[in-house]
């Protein structure tokens, strides 16, 4: 007795599910939304505001964070700075290195030496800027390529 009851209850359910599936008619429907043609749009140019490198960032900025940079190809690199002057750098290809960084005497720039390369960064509130060298103006030109940012605290 139990099996015929189950079958009687299952049959309408199966028909309802089949009806929801659509079938050939549903798959052939086309909605004309009018958006298939290319549209010329004037996008306004937006100036990005970057925080300034702080005078004495070492004492005035919470620099102990993870900073992220996305390159033009969409690859993401990160630099994490620790309270003990340690860093961990992960390049876009997944290569990870770590060590210690040094502060310059102005306490606004740091030096990371990695694989024989010296990298100088200006330290701002929520951002690190890779500088061309130790003589570059820490508040000089900013580009997305040389900017690492951290989420707001």
Image (cartoon, rainbow, N blue to C red):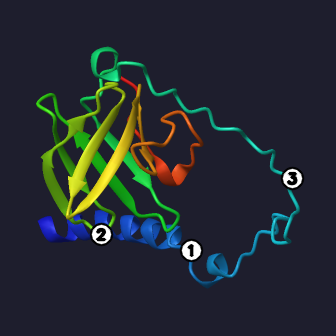
* Residue in front for this viewpoint, 9 or 99: 99
Q: Quadrant of residue 13?
A: bottom left
Q: Nearer the viewer, mark 2 or mark 1?
A: 2
Compared to 34, does 86 lie above or below?
above
Question: In the rendered image, which residue does mark 3 sit on?
Answer: 42
* Residue in front for this viewpoint, 101 or 81: 101
> What is the C-alpha distance between the residues marked 2 and 1?
45 Å
The number of numbered badges drawn on the structure is 3
Residue at position x 21%, y 66% in the image: 95
Mark 2 or mark 1: whose residue is earlier in sequence: 1
Compared to 136, does 116 lie above or below?
below
Which element type, helix, strand or loop, lies under badge 1?
loop
Residue at position x 57%, y 48% in the image: 143
Which element type, helix, strand or loop, lies under badge 3?
loop
> What is the C-alpha distance between the residues marked 3 and 1?
41 Å
> What is the C-alpha distance between the residues marked 2 and 3?
35 Å
Question: In the rendered image, which residue does mark 1 sit on?
Answer: 22
Q: Around disc 2, counting alpha carbons within 10 Å, would you say few (fewer than 14), some (14 to 19), or many (20 or more)?
A: few
Kindly tell me whether residue 136 is visible in this rendering.
yes
x, y (%) of residue 33? Answer: 81, 63
Question: In the rendered image, which residue does mark 2 sit on?
Answer: 93
Q: Quadrant of the N terminus?
A: bottom left
x, y (%) of residue 152? Answer: 40, 26
Which element type, helix, strand or loop, lies under badge 2?
loop
């Amino acid at each position: 007795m139990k099996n015929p009851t189950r079958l009687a209850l299952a049959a309408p359910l199966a028909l309802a599910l089949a009806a929801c599936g659509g079938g050939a008619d549903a798959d052939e429907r086309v909605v004309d939304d009018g958006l298939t043609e290319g549209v010329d749009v004037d996008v306004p140019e937006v100036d990005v505001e970057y925080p300034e490198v702080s005078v004495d960032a070492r004492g005035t900025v919470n620099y102990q964070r993870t900073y992220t940079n996305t390159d033009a190809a969409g690859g993401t690199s990160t630099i994490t700075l620790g309270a003990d002057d340690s860093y961990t750098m992960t390049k876009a290809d997944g290569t990870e290195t770590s060590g210690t960084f040094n502060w310059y005497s102005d306490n606004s720039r740091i030096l990371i030496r990695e694989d024989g390369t010296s990298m100088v960064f200006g330290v701002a509130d929520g951002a690190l800027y890779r500088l061309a060298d130790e003589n570059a103006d820490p508040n000089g030109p900013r580009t997305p390529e040389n900017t690492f940012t951290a989420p707001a605290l």
